[in-house]
Image (tube, helix red, strand yellow):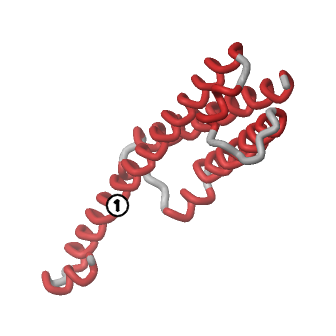
Amino acid sequence: MGKRLSQLIQTLRDELQAYGKLLARLERQADAGPHRFASYTSFRKGEIGIRCRAISHAQQLRWEAWRNVARALHLKSMPPLEALIPLLPDDYQAMISGLHRQNRERMEQVVSSLLINRKKRSATLHRARQNDCRTIGLRRQNRRKVLA
């Protein structure tokens, strides 16, 4: 059981680290300013996409470790991690609970940062389209069609 719990703790730490790396990358991108945002294609294929896949892999490993702990406790179904924590030895409860809480908080920060970055990119694209319309001299009624 100790080995399985150690593996669960390590996978929680790895997941937390993966969230931290993505959050740092998103902050660097936001600090670069709206004019330097990457296009959607390079966003998907770039470093952020790699970081997202790393998080997905870390989550999968954590889930497998969690399942192994549940099996070791002879549970028939997979309870949520919050329900599993009270069944663990006292020595591990605080650490696993803390790591799980930090992972949730970090995930919320990542989602929030992604939404903020998306809004900034969207506003930048809209301004660029407006400037392009003015540059090529489109009439107002035609600008609305282009900007929609």
The x, y position of residue 55, in whole percent, is 65, 44
- Position of 132 compared to 15: left or right? left
Foreground residue among 137 and 148: 148
Picture quarter with the N terminus: top right
Looking at the rendered structure, the number of numbered marks drawn on it comes to 1
As drawn, the residue found furthest toward the left would be 140
Is 37 located above or below residue 28 in the figure? below
Report whether 112 appears left or right of 75.
left
Rate crowding at label 1 as few (under 14), some (14 to 19) or many (20 or more) other CA atoms within 10 Å: few
Quadrant in which residue 81 is drawn:
top right
Is residue 116 found left or right of 68 in the rendered image? Answer: left
What residue is shown with label 1?
122
Residue at 53% of width from left, 36% of height from top? 104
Quarter of the rendering occupied by the C terminus: bottom left
| Rendering quarter of residue 7 | top right
Residue 111 position in % (x across, y down): 46, 46
Residue shown at 72% from the left, 43% from the top: 63
Question: Where is residue 35 drawn, in percent x and y?
Answer: 37, 52
The residue sitting at 54% across, 28% down in the picture is 102
| Depth check, front residue: 25 or 129 | 25
Q: Position of residue 51 (x, y in %)?
A: 63, 45
Q: What residue is shown at x 40% (from left), y 55% (from top)?
A: 118
Foreground residue among 143 and 86:
86
As drawn, is 116 to the left or to the right of 86? left
| Residue type, numbered disc 1 | Ser
Q: Is residue 137 above or below residue 108?
A: below
Vertical relation: 23 (above or below) 146: above
Secondary element at image label 1: helix
